[in-house]
């Protein structure tokens, strides 16, 4: 329900991201997707724990944002952002493959 309201509001009003946060948002979204796919996989495997999911979700987003911030401070923000996207992308696709096998048996 809340997700639907958020999507509707975002679509109607258009996304408005503060300039200072803009470089971190894409990485935060990828980190959040990693946690969501990991949570879905854990749920289907019967080992889901809400506390672990919430901590994983928040921690993934904060660590990814911190790494991007640190990269910006060191002058290598683009390289670290790319590395984060690659690593989290591998995890997301691994979890997606596990979900596909679990749900479709293929």
Image (spheres, grey):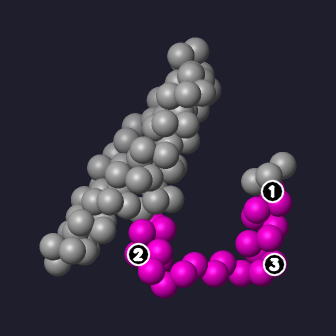
Residue 74 image offset from top left, x and y in percent:
15, 73
Residue shown at 49%/46% (left/top)?
58
Between 11 and 57, the one nearer to me in the picture: 57
Q: Secondary structure at mark 2?
A: loop
Between 93 and 32, the one nearer to me in the picture: 32
Cα separation, mark 2 vs mark 1, equals 25 Å
Does the rendering let one see residue 20?
yes
Q: Which mark is on residue 85?
A: none
Residue shown at 37%/61% (left/top)?
65
- Magenta stretch encompasses residue 19: yes
Which residue position holds label 3?
12
Which residues are the magenta region? Answer: 4-26
Q: Which mark is on residue 23?
A: 2
Q: Residues within 10 Å of mark 3 (few under 14, many from 20)?
A: few
Judged from this view, the residue extending furthest toward the bottom is 19
Between 35 and 96, the one nearer to me in the picture: 35
Cα separation, mark 3 vs mark 2, equals 23 Å
Q: Are marks 2 and 1 in contact (CB under 8 Å)?
A: no
Does the rendering let one see residue 96?
no
First-in-chain label (3 vs 1): 1
Cα separation, mark 3 vs mark 1, equals 12 Å
Q: Note whether 10 is above or below 84 in the view shown.
A: below
Q: Note whether 37 is above or below 84 in the view shown.
A: above
Q: Note whether 75 is above or below 48 in the view shown.
A: below
Which residue position holds label 1?
4
Q: Secondary structure at mark 3?
A: helix
Q: Nearer the viewer, mark 3 or mark 2?
A: 2
Residue shown at 76%/74% (left/top)?
11
First-in-chain label (2 vs 1): 1
Residue shown at 71%/81% (left/top)?
14
């Amino acid at each position: 329900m809340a997700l639907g309201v958020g999507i509707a509001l975002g679509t109607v009003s258009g996304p408005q991201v503060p300039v200072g946060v803009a470089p971190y948002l894409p990485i935060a979204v990828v980190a959040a997707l990693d946690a969501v796919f990991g949570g879905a996989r854990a749920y289907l495997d019967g080992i889901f724990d809400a506390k672990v999911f919430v901590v994983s979700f928040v921690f993934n987003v904060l660590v990814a944002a911190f790494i991007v911030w640190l990269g910006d401070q060191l002058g290598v923000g683009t390289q670290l952002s790319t590395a984060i996207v690659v690593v989290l992308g591998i995890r997301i696709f691994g979890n997606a493959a596990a979900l596909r096998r679990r749900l479709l048996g293929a």
